[in-house]
Image (cartoon, helix red, strand yellow):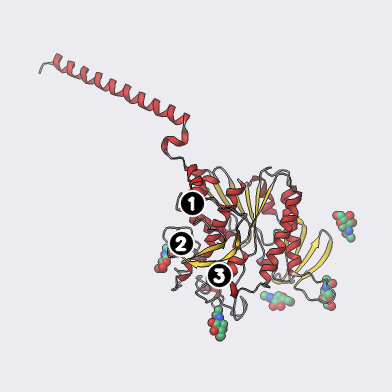
Amino acid sequence: MNSSSLLQKISKKMTNIRRLTLYLLFCITLSFITFFLFPRNFFNPISNHNVLYLEPQLNLKDCDLSQGHWIPDERGSLYTNSTCTTIPDSKNCLKHGRQNTDFIFWRWKPKGCDLPRFNPKAFLNLVRGKKMNFIGDSVARNHMESLLCLLSMEETPKDIYKDGEDRNRIWYFPDHDFTLSTSWSKFLVAGFKRTHANKTGTGVYDIDINKIDDQWAKDLPNTDIAIVSAGHWLFRPIYIHRGNETLGCIFCYLPNTTQISLKEGFKLVFSAAFRHINACHSCKSNLVTVLRTLSPSHFENGTWNTGGACGRTIPFSVNEINPQNRGLEIKTSQIEELEEIKRDSLKKKFAVLDVTRTMLMRPDGHPNSYWGNKWMKGFNDCTHWCLPGPIDTWSEFLMVLLKQLM
Ligand SMILES: *[C@@H]1O[C@H](CO)[C@@H](O)[C@H](O)[C@H]1NC(C)=O
Ligand SMILES: *[C@@H]1O[C@H](CO)[C@@H](O)[C@H](O)[C@H]1NC(C)=O
Ligand SMILES: *[C@@H]1O[C@H](CO)[C@@H](O)[C@H](O)[C@H]1NC(C)=O
Ligand SMILES: *[C@@H]1O[C@H](CO)[C@@H](O)[C@H](O)[C@H]1NC(C)=O
Ligand SMILES: *[C@@H]1O[C@H](CO)[C@@H](O)[C@H](O)[C@H]1NC(C)=O
């Protein structure tokens, strides 16, 4: 082969390469044009949003989600302790030796309708671009952790922020631009622990219903969906103040002190929280507030510090629930306070995620002794809920609510 024929060959090859490059450039340009004109449909010909409309719509007019019973469901939970890597150790009941797994195989059957199984894809599409904040105590965080596991089946969340005590937490789902966070609050309003001269706690608290707890007050303006709950810290001696006026005390039983019932205490606290939200001018005008009602504990044969336990392995039936249960009475007052605000509210939306009765029937869903309680042997957890477990149902309720609100 002489040098000129070699050059000719190379030149021919170069022409081919140039053609190929031009062709590729053309394709890429076309793709970009298509992408910008039809962004979502390009990669995903069936738009994710359609998923929502293919599901049967729940007509809540005929159906009160809080009325119903638990029925066996062999499908079990959407996730396991191996697919969800964010289950906190203290809620990972199976890891800590819980043998009986029956508690996972139930689903809630509301009277008059069917509750759709949680759909992480549909949920993430519904909350695309939003910030959802769980405001409250460790049970509020428990709910957030459950939702995090459910949503992880669709997209792996990014751990964005965690404070020193792991109380305030932020997770982010980049593909859906969805932020999930917790704002820790014991009482929703400002609370102060009374201490002895030697700085140890007395077990008595003071709360001021004129002052909203700092952390969530600070986080609220940046929130689209606020899930508000609290309650477990109110079951102790608490002096309730309104500014410099002392209204009385819950669980003090002192002759010189005005007695406030637990129910009245709940009303004062939740009313203060809802009034703050409704009056919040720096908040988004379309802020959605969801009251998650009291989550009942199930200590039997004692209280949390006197050896009480929750060793049952199946749910209660409707007949086993006492209609005079204190938890039901409390949730009624929580809902009354919300309804009161709803009447005054112009633009902001308020809704109720009523879990109290549903969860009263689940004495089998708590960690009990299976929470890795190295430091507190003999203390059982009958307040929080195992993950996976019946608390996952709360997000199914939430999905139904959000579909109607957003
Ligand atoms: C998951 O649960 C099983 C028991 O079902 C347990 O043996 C295992 O250690 C747990 N795994 C994790 C990662 O927690
Ligand atoms: C602190 O003071 C209280 C009340 O005087 C007492 O009951 C308690 O034992 C003390 N605790 C410690 C650790 O000294
Ligand atoms: C209570 O607070 C109000 C308003 O903050 C103030 O005007 C009043 O003087 C206070 N009363 C007492 C007894 O401190
Ligand atoms: C009520 O009386 C008890 C003892 O009689 C006293 O220790 C306590 O400080 C009093 N409480 C208030 C709020 O005045
Ligand atoms: C409570 O005590 C009774 C009688 O000892 C026992 O049968 C029952 O299992 C206990 N309940 C729980 C939840 O441990």
Q: Residue 24's x, y, as percent?
A: 33, 26
Per the image, label 3 sits on a secondary structure element best described as loop
Cα separation between marks 1 and 2: 13 Å
**What amino acid is labelled 1 in the image?**
Pro
Residue in the foreground of this view, choosing between 310 and 352: 352
Q: Residue 299's x, y, as percent?
A: 60, 75
**What amino acid is labelled 2 in the image?**
Ser
Disc 2, disc 3: CB below 8 Å? no
Q: Residue 189's x, y, as percent?
A: 72, 58
Residue in the foreground of this view, choosing between 340 and 247: 340
Q: Which residue is mark 1?
A: 120
Q: Which residue is mark 3?
A: 362
User: Does 79 appear above or below 17?
Assistant: below
Per the image, label 2 sits on a secondary structure element best described as loop
**What amino acid is labelled 3 in the image?**
Arg
Can you tell me which quadrant of the image ligand 4 is in? bottom right
Mark 1 closeness class: few <14, some 14–19, many ≥20 residues within 10 Å? many
